[in-house]
Image (cartoon, rainbow, N blue to C red):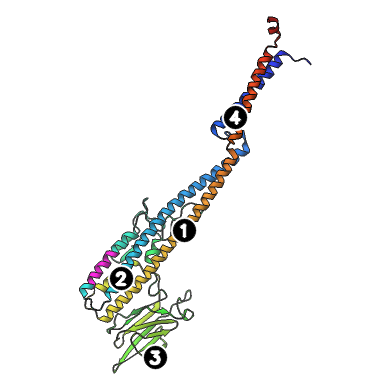
Amino acid sequence: MRISTAYSFDSSIDNLQKRQSEMSQSQMQLTSGKKVNFASDDPIAAARAERALASIAREDANQRSLDASRNVMQLSESAIGDAVSLLQTARESMVAAGNGSYTDKEREALALKLKDIRAQMLTIANRSDGSGGFVFGGQGSATPPFLDTTSGVQFVGQGGQVQAAAGETLNLTVDGDQTWLKAKSGNGVYETNPASTNTGAGWITAGSVTSPSALPYPAAPGGTPPQYAVTFTVNASVTTYSVTKDGGGTTLTDVPYASGKAIVIDGMSFAVNGQPANADNFTIDQSTNDLSVFDALDSAINSLTTSNQGSGRIMQAVNRGLSNLDSVLGNVSAARSAVGESLNRMDSIEGRISASKLAAETERSNAEDLDMVSAISKFQNQQTGYDAALKSYAMVQKLSLFQYING
């Protein structure tokens, strides 16, 4: 077989160019640290890398949402913690107001303290989240969500919560309406109240539950909750009471009265203390969930600034104030617990985000990252082969007929 000189030269040059191209590609891979620099290098690996990068971007967005939510929840927890401390201070003031030796002026001084607490509570309820919104703004509010009006503090925002756009449930606000304005009245099941026409020194406790199965509260959906009335009769220095239900049937009749002795009826237990007057009346109704922190404080302030009250009215005011403060304190504490649970859940969410992002980064690395040890060895082999090809070409070049003639 005859091999022409031109073919030999062309073949050698093609081999040199091929080896030079391979070296150039290896050099690019070593420089970038990636084995896939263009989709044409490995379409399948490039697609895997793109999917992994998209997943990383999603997890980065989820992490930003998580950070924003955590910031708001930490602000909320701090704000509610401040509110709990203030309410506990208010409760201590109400306990002090029950001191029988206190004068009206001393109770007015306690009322001034409660007014200051109320002002601080309003500031806390309108706390900013640092980004133009409000922590307790519900579903968003461009203005402070709580407005102090002549009829009390009103929530002017939208109830509910704003959630971050993420795969997990992440809140960016707290439902201020529920936190500050929706506590249960009374003891949380029923509430006891004196009639405004009472003239005696009797006062009624908040009561407790003795038999949940016997309770008439809460009423069935669509039904009307019953109302109980305790009416006192004083005849020849003998005091008795009767209990009626819904103003109709008598449940208890002419029971001898003893101050502080429990009245037990339909799973409820409460007591009347002091000395009621003839025809004094107390009612028992189902609790409602519309007691606000500010109404509880306003009621306590009003009762402490009223002068010339008898001992019975003072004790009733103190007892009612304590019951209201306990109720709103429980509601606010429940909101704090919910915020704390959200913060705990965020730790788990962050772990899942980190794990998912690590898996995506591992997939991207497997698809496009270069094995440096293997690549360096390969590049050295290519260099050796290229040098050999150059030397071979130089030797073949000397076999030309023209070189032989000239030689």
Decide which of tag 1 and tag 4 comes sooner along the chain: 4
Dot 2, how many residues are within 10 Å of its Cα: few (below 14), some (14-19), or many (20+)? few
Q: Position of residue 297 (x, y in %)?
A: 31, 69
Decide which of tag 3 and tag 4 comes sooner along the chain: 4
315 left or right, relative to 70: left
Q: Secondary structure at mark 4?
A: helix
Q: Nearer the viewer, residue 354 or 171?
A: 354
Q: Give the distance between the C-alpha atoms of the residues marked 1 and 4, in whole angstroms.
A: 49 Å
Residue placed under numbered mark 2 in the picture: 92
Q: Is residue 35 visible?
A: no
Disc 1 residue type (three-letter): Asn
Residue placed under numbered mark 1 in the picture: 344
Dot 3, how many residues are within 10 Å of its Cα: few (below 14), some (14-19), or many (20+)? few
Decide which of tag 2 and tag 1 comes sooner along the chain: 2
Chain part drawn in magenta:
107-117
Q: Give the distance between the C-alpha atoms of the residues marked 2 and 3, in whole angstroms.
A: 39 Å
Residue 99 lies within the magenta run: no
Q: Residue furthest right?
A: 1
Decide which of tag 1 and tag 3 comes sooner along the chain: 3
Residue placed under numbered mark 4 in the picture: 26
